[in-house]
Image (cartoon, helix red, strand yellow):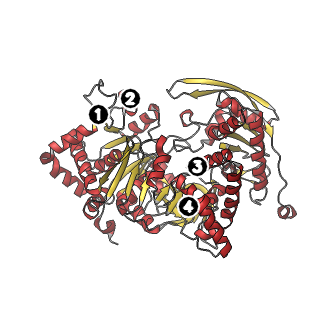
Amino acid sequence: MTEGAAGLRSIPALLHRNATQYANAPAYREKEFGIWQTWSWAETEKEIEALALGLLNLGVNKGDYIAIIGRNRPYLYWSMVAAQSVGAVPVPLYQDAVAEEMEYVLAHCGARFVIAADQEQVDKVIEIQDDLHQFEHMIYLDARGMRKYDHRRLHQYSHVQDQGRAAYDEFIEELKARRDSLDYDDTCVMLYTSGTTGKPKGVVLSNRNIIETARASSEFDHLKANDEVLAYLPMAWVGDFIFSIGQAYWTGFCVNCPESPETMMTDLKEIAPTYFFAPPRVFETQLTNIMIRMEDAGSFKRKLFKNFMDHARKVGPKILDGEPVSGMDKLKYALGNLMVYGPLKNALGFSKVRVGYTAGEAIGPEIFDFYRSLGINLKQLYGQTEATVFITQQPDGQVRSDTVGVPSPGVELRIAENGEVFYRSPGVFVEYYKNAESTADTKDAEGWVATGDAGFIEEATGHLRIIDRAKDVGQMADGRMFAPKYVENKLKFFPNILEAVVFGAGRDRCTAFINIDLTAVGNWAERNNIAYASYQELAGHPQVLDTIQNHIEEVNQSVAQDEMLSGCQIHRFLVLHKELDADDGELTRTRKVRRKIIAEKFQDLVTALYDGSTSVYTETEVTYEDGRKGAIKATLEIRDAKVMPIATKMAAE
């Protein structure tokens, strides 16, 4: 293949190819007011061209940064490509970020223009605009509630397009010149990291990064123009960008946008995508909902479900991978597919999934195996923003819950002496914007990037196994390995547990904070006529604590079987009085635990877990939905969990 993927050296170039080659094929769908609207590739090119001309009319220069804020909508995806078409750099932001978080990103990148979805996002930018010295104009998509605003620097999206169409003769030659000048090493997008350990960093990704990665990953999984995806993950996340822009424009498949986050599951079922990606939390939530429904079902249905699911776990993955199973097993599985697996997949929206992926965090093996046992080709990939997502992928027929696959096409791997994973590939980011020091710390002169994760490559299979974040992997006081994420993922398999944070580095034993899942535990409380007024009250209920203790002791039994990590059994735990929240700084916007911040914020609780206390009083500051601050007070019960003897084989050694 020639440099620049046969001359296609930018996303706008891919758009033009698709508008020519797949002119009448669907490019985007969006559900609005309960009705799906469709735009073909030819129509999409016209929409993007009108917006690009409108941006030129507003004075967008080459190299300008254009922030894009909102949920997944075709118009906002078009905004990113229109920005690229005029030589500007799109910078998508997390729509649930508070104004203060947005201020940092907008000031850091120096955005002159903002394209916002609705009044809520416009208000956030207006709140901080006096501190944004480069900011000049904002374009809004949804006009509801915007009538009485000062429109000197506010412009309606459709009006910008109309003005672009009206100025066609004036600006079309300039647009063509800018579009044609786009090159492989020009910036395609800037995406900010989640900021797990500090301020987010602006990751600069070039056209080369996006297109080469999209091409290689699409060929790896045989993605085609007739595939369908559901775009529902944050547009500021690299995974959504590579799936909904990179791969979509490379292959020409259709991107479907749900009506709202609340209707996502219904819309997923209606679209029935063939290619699907979700972080572990989505699969965990779906499994929780399944288990809740089964608890509410009659005894016959529960027995039927258990019988067929036990069989599915035994033979489902083998059938999926084409391994031999007996005729009777096949027959029973086919019957199960008719009565249980098929209807369940249809209810989940997975009836047509040909390729499914999960990544972002490690998924619990039990959760992963559950979906594969249904016949869903769910696989794991390992990636980072700095890699343009793909570092490793699992080839069909080589899918396991305990590895993240082999190096993606074009990716090289090496393991440092301390166990940290390094990679090099065409997807390696250009730099961290305005942060040469961090760039040099992360990427060396030869292009090798430090992942920050500890792992090893299996000699027999070439598969990569990730143990944990390198900074989180440590030792217990007696020298045994401490890998908290391994235990946390096992805990989160239980529908009642939403989040877990395990402590133990440098200590003589492990302890844990637990967040209950309000949906699952609340459903249990209703079935058992247990009244509760708040999350806090339910989290402290003795029967809830009994249930969580049983789950922890079951996990301890499993952990005890692992020779390397048997020391990570949980000795003591408490159930937190509040849900960990991104608005309170305890999670990132991609829902990753900010372990260090949690340890510092709840230092009194950590101390109580280790000093033998049976309860602890605490006061915690919280942020309400409207941005106000408040405090909640609670006395939390601390419980001991039964620790299991390590496996006999290990004891003998």
**What is the C-alpha distance between the residues marked 3 and 2?**
33 Å
Within 10 Å of disc 1 (Cα), the crowding (few <14, some 14-19, many 20+) is some
Q: Secondary structure at mark 1?
A: loop
Q: Which residue is mark 1?
A: 136
Q: Secondary structure at mark 3?
A: helix
**What is the C-alpha distance between the residues marked 1 and 3?**
43 Å
Q: Indicate the quadrant where residue 211 lies.
A: bottom left
Q: Are marks 3 and 4 in contact (CB under 8 Å)?
A: no
Q: Which residue is mark 2?
A: 123
Q: Which residue is painted at 44% across and 31% down in the image?
A: 99
Q: Which residue is mark 3?
A: 286
Report how many numbered discs are placed on residues in the image: 4
Q: Earlier in the sequence, mark 3 or mark 4?
A: 3
Residue 270, given in percent of the width and then of the height, sits at 45, 52
Q: Are marks 1 and 2 in contact (CB under 8 Å)?
A: no
**What is the C-alpha distance between the residues marked 3 and 4?**
14 Å
Image quarter in which the C terminus is found:
bottom right
**What is the C-alpha distance between the residues marked 1 and 2?**
15 Å
Q: Which residue is painted at 53% across and 55% down in the image?
A: 346
Within 10 Å of disc 2 (Cα), the crowding (few <14, some 14-19, many 20+) is some
Q: Earlier in the sequence, mark 1 or mark 3?
A: 1
In the picture provided, is 36 more to the left or to the right than 333?
left
Residue 134, given in percent of the width and then of the height, sits at 32, 35
Q: Which residue is mark 4?
A: 378
- Observer-nearest residue: 448 or 160? 160
Q: Earlier in the sequence, mark 1 or mark 4?
A: 1
